[in-house]
């Protein structure tokens, strides 16, 4: 993370005695990225964080991936499956795979109950809150999150998701990396501070403000690891941290706080980049003023993905570049693979220019894009909601011919 934080009680000097009121020691734990060579935090527990009493195997459900064969553009609607029993009741055991490869997995979840305690020891997770509200309890403290928030959980952070009551059900789009997800390097100084041209900064990040203590004896923690998964039973609840400090911790960031770059002509997707991970990037396409060149075309131009597969999640708005023929609507996901040139659907350019002529000066749509530099394969949440004729939606037959 870009900056240091200190929460709760910590000793004056690290790796020194730090005593509880009864004279016993607090138990120090270091959580560090890249061994001892990158960002880390020190946490101080009431009990040793190492007291395992049992280990059982655990196999997460439905992690199989099918290749995009024959390669074609795809349109998925996993939200349409929510009443069909595909998704479980919580955000950990109930998540289902949409797409992925050796670097990243993308899940959909529609939780209604509290998840078990969970650690992803394979990499960081960034979860986009599609709708609803939740309380995320972590070993660092608590985050209250809502629709439009990105929630960044560092590798091996013990946490659980608790849906909160509200007008809308909780829906989550989960990006789980095999490695670390960070703000793009181009936004950061060599010491990690956000630079002036960055579209968000430290003030936009919400972090746990206080520690969170949970009572309890033996408790299970579900863990995913590079060599498999397990349920670890600990003698003491891991939420027994009285203080921590460092530069590694969970945080939330609202897509509404992302500051778009506007130019005379349409700006390319890298200006919307929000996070980077191992061989993938995440972008936030957000509402913005229209381009101001008098002849600018205010929708994306046709382009070919030479090196990446593109997954677009259409969160909110009118999605003007997709046009009426595409079938794209709120909560749709499209995938445009390497080797496929794609762009505005028939009539979209003309429609956008007509809107400009009528005085419209603002683009009101929001989407999350994940570009991977290895081919995407598809999981059950995608295959079971596939719209098979999507690839034909750019085709305009000559009048009188068969489609």
Image (cartoon, grey):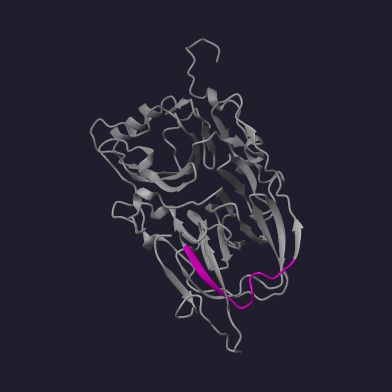
- Counting labels gives 0
| For residue 346, above or below residue 256 | above
Q: Residue at x 55, y 12 (%)?
A: 402
Percent x, y of residue 327: 53, 32
Q: Residue at the location (72% across, 46% down)?
A: 85
Comparing 383 with 20, the one in front is: 20
Res. 298 in view: yes
175 within the magenta span: no
Q: Is residue 109 left or right of residue 183?
A: right
**Quarter occupied by the C terminus:** top right
Q: Which residue is most to the bottom? A: 22
Q: Is residue 358 above or below residue 57?
A: above
Q: Quadrant of residue 1?
A: bottom left
Residue 199 x/y as whole percent: 34, 51
Q: Residue furthest top?
A: 400
- Describe residue 112's horizontal placement relative to residue 183 as left or right: right
Magenta-drawn segment: 40-53
Q: Quadrant of residue 132?
A: bottom right
Q: Residue furthest left?
A: 294
> Which of 53 and 348 lies nearest the eye of the viewer?
53
The answer to whether residue 50 is magenta is: yes
Determine whether, in the image, residue 203 is placed left or right of residue 36.
Answer: left
Q: Position of residue 347 (x, y in %)?
A: 41, 25
- Residue 192: x %, y % from top left: 37, 58
Quadrant hosting residue 349: top left
**Horizontal relation, residue 4 to residue 78: left or right:** left
> From this viewpoint, is residue 369 visible?
no
């Amino acid at each position: 993370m870009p900056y240091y934080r200190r929460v709760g009680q910590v000793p004056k000097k690290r790796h020194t005695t730090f005593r509880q009121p009864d004279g016993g020691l607090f138990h120090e734990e270091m959580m560090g990225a890249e061994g001892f060579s990158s960002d880390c935090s020190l946490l101080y527990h009431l009990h040793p964080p190492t007291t395992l009493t049992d280990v059982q195997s655990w196999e997460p459900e439905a992690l199989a991936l099918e290749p995009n064969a024959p390669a074609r553009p795809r349109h998925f609607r996993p939200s349409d499956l929510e009443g069909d029993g595909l998704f479980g009741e919580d955000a950990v055991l109930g998540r289902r795979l949409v797409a992925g490869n050796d670097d990243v997995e993308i899940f959909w979840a529609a939780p209604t109950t509290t998840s078990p305690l969970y650690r992803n020891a394979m990499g960081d997770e960034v979860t986009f809150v599609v709708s609803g509200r939740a309380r995320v309890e972590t070993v660092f403290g608590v985050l209250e999150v809502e629709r439009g928030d990105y929630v960044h959980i560092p590798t091996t952070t013990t946490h659980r998701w608790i849906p909160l009551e509200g007008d809308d059900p909780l829906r989550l789009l989960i990006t789980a990396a095999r490695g670390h997800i960070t703000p793009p390097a181009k936004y950061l100084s060599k010491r990690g501070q956000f630079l002036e041209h960055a579209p968000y900064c430290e003030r936009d990040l919400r972090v746990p403000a206080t520690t969170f203590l949970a009572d309890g004896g033996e408790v299970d923690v579900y863990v995913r690891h590079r060599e498999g998964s397990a349920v670890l039973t600990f003698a003491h609840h891991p939420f027994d941290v009285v203080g921590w400090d460092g530069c590694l911790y969970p945080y939330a960031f609202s897509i509404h706080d992302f500051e778009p770059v506007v130019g005379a002509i349409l700006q390319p997707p890298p200006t919307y980049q929000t996070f980077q991970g191992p061989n993938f990037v995440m972008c936030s396409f957000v509402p913005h003023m229209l381009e101001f060149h008098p002849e600018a075309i205010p929708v994306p131009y046709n382009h070919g993905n030479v090196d990446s597969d593109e997954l677009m999640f259409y969160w909110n708005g009118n999605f003007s570049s997709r046009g009426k023929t595409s079938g794209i609507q709120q909560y749709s996901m499209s995938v445009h693979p390497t080797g496929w040139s794609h762009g505005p659907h028939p009539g979209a350019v003309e429609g956008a220019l007509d809107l400009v002529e009528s005085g419209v000066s603002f683009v009101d749509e929001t989407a999350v894009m994940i570009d991977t530099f290895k081919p995407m394969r598809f999981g059950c949440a995608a295959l079971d909601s596939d719209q098979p004729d999507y690839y034909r939606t750019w085709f305009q037959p000559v009048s009188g011919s068969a489609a």
